[in-house]
Image (tube, coloured by chain):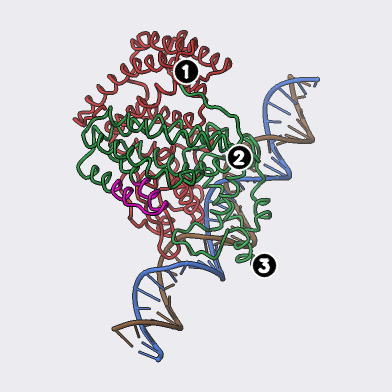
Chain colours: A green, B red, C brown, D blue
Amino acid sequence: MKPHKSASKALRGSSKTPQKSPRSSLHRSVAQDIGARILNGEFAPGTLLPNEAEWCKSFGVSRTAVREAIKMLMGKGLIISRPRIGSRVQPREQWNLLDRDVLAWYCAAAKQSHFLAHMQQVREILEPETAALAAANHTAEQMRAIEDAYEEMAAAKTLAAWNDADVRFHFAILQAAGNELLVPLGLVIESALGSMFNYTARQKGDVGRTLPGHARILSAIRARRPNAARLAVRKLLGDTSRIVGQVIQAAGKKQRVVRA
Amino acid sequence: MKPHKSASKALRGSSKTPQKSPRSSLHRSVAQDIGARILNGEFAPGTLLPNEAEWCKSFGVSRTAVREAIKMLMGKGLIISRPRIGSRVQPREQWNLLDRDVLAWYCAAAKQSHFLAHMQQVREILEPETAALAAANHTAEQMRAIEDAYEEMAAAKTLAAWNDADVRFHFAILQAAGNELLVPLGLVIESALGSMFNYTARQKGDVGRTLPGHARILSAIRARRPNAARLAVRKLLGDTSRIVGQVIQAAGKKQRVVRA
DNA sequence: AATAATCGTTTGTATGATAAATGACGCCAA
DNA sequence: TTGGCGTCATTTATCATACAAACGATTATT
């Protein structure tokens, strides 16, 4: 019996697209599925997962693929497996929530609006200080990267191009801050926001409206004025925050996040 | 040939200690070794790693174990592997630096003092705001957890007991902030700091000296005064910052971190 | 010379077997 | 009855081997 092909196709999304990066492999798909179901609450922390043989049957794949998937999830702190016991879902404190995949699964799992607010909160804490650090520490080369991104943003015709440049703008500031920990942190936040938000809330009108805000940030950093940079970012975030608030309200949730 | 036992023993650190958590398994050890070497700079980003067969030989383990180790590293964004090409070290932006293991490997890799400063910087950004959020959002139960930790801290006789309570104190504040993203973030920072710093810089004399600072934080949170909490944390961090600064200086590095 | 077919290397997946770990159970003794 | 001890069964851990798939390089073909 060789379910090689068929089982594979059943799992992988569109086998039509032979993407550059190997986003589709069996173990990856299996890990994706199990991980999403854990974050989804289907398997609560402390729960004993089905054993490997059962996963094999339910996915129609070999034990090799299942084990490799489990190893990936172990690496993300979601589960722990021991002989004779099986694989158990770890307590939430162990979860590597800052992992791109885990965060994506978490975003996809229901509580979006409530989570979106938390993410925005973290942004409001991190980004002003990041900009301030960038103002204090940036090198000439890093400054140029920020300016380039701004130019592209200003010249962007399509919404997609604008978003692309916007992401580069923020990333350039992150790097200019000169703190190696802030970079992955910012990346995670941005990517998660992008994946759930999809930046669709930004209407075309917003583009022009937020450009001056970006300009203020740019010049504050260039002038090496940390406090001005901090304030400029706060101001820009204030607008975004309003939009996020509207999205949350539109989602019909009354969940409120208290701002300190 | 059954190199099962021997090869295993050669890799795992002390096979004398059958720890509760399965910290020792072949794939884990292999992942540990390769991961540390990547973070160590032995395999730079973009480098093509030895292929699986060579890892098997050099570690004396089967391909299964090597592959599972590679899957864990893939899950952490350190490497990517493709058929016919092999496994390549990902660019640093892809690394999941916020992963406990990755961070530990990174800490172990040389640049400690410089990294310690960056970590301290992130603490100075996050912790005041976390305390402010806790002041605004805490529930009665969360408040009790904070108070309990404080009591234990005050009653602690040994340095170890004090550190233990201290960690719980900070963790309780993290949870009281009511932001699910801040919890893992804080955990990562604390654990990394703990692992490299080992809290040995805190002499016994410091214990008594920082207790009032903790008390101020506690009462500010209890009184639901976010701004007071923020200031209290900043003050306490100022002391720690001095200690860290001394450690860095003691390390003989002149590396300076510009504070915005 | 440009294009197509072929080949070889490397990872991906499957399969089956054995080893090790450990909870559960039953046995024996105090 | 109860507490300790050995056995057993289940599950993961590891090994070994084989084949499939992907894809760069090479060679053949037009």
User: A255 or B115: nearer the eye?
Assistant: A255
Q: Amino acid at mark 3?
A: Met
Give the quadrant of residue B241: top left
Residue at the spot 53% in from the left edge and 47% down from the top edge = A71
- According to the image, label 1 marks what residue? B169
- According to the image, label 3 marks what residue? A1
Disc 1 residue crowd, few under 14, some 14–19, many 20+, Cα 10 Å: many
Task: Please determine whether, in this image, residue B157 is positioned above or below residue A240.
Answer: above
In this picture, which residue range is highlighted in magenta?
Answer: A149-168
The residues tagged by marks 3 and 2 sit, at their Cα atoms, a distance apart of 39 Å
Mark 1 — on which chain does it sit?
Answer: B
Residue at the spot 46% in from the left edge and 21% down from the top edge = A260
- According to the image, label 2 marks what residue? A110
Q: Amino acid at mark 2?
A: Ala
Image quadrant in which the C terminus of chain B is located = top left
Say whether residue C22 is left or right of residue B6: right
Mark 2 — on which chain does it sit?
Answer: A
Give the quadrant of residue B243: top left
Residue at the spot 49% in from the left edge and 33% down from the top edge = B17
Task: Please determine whether, in this image, residue A82 is positioned above or below residue B122.
Answer: below
The residues tagged by marks 1 and 3 sit, at their Cα atoms, a distance apart of 58 Å
Quick check: do tags 1 and 3 share a chain? no
Any part of residue B6 in sight: no
Magenta span includes A157: yes
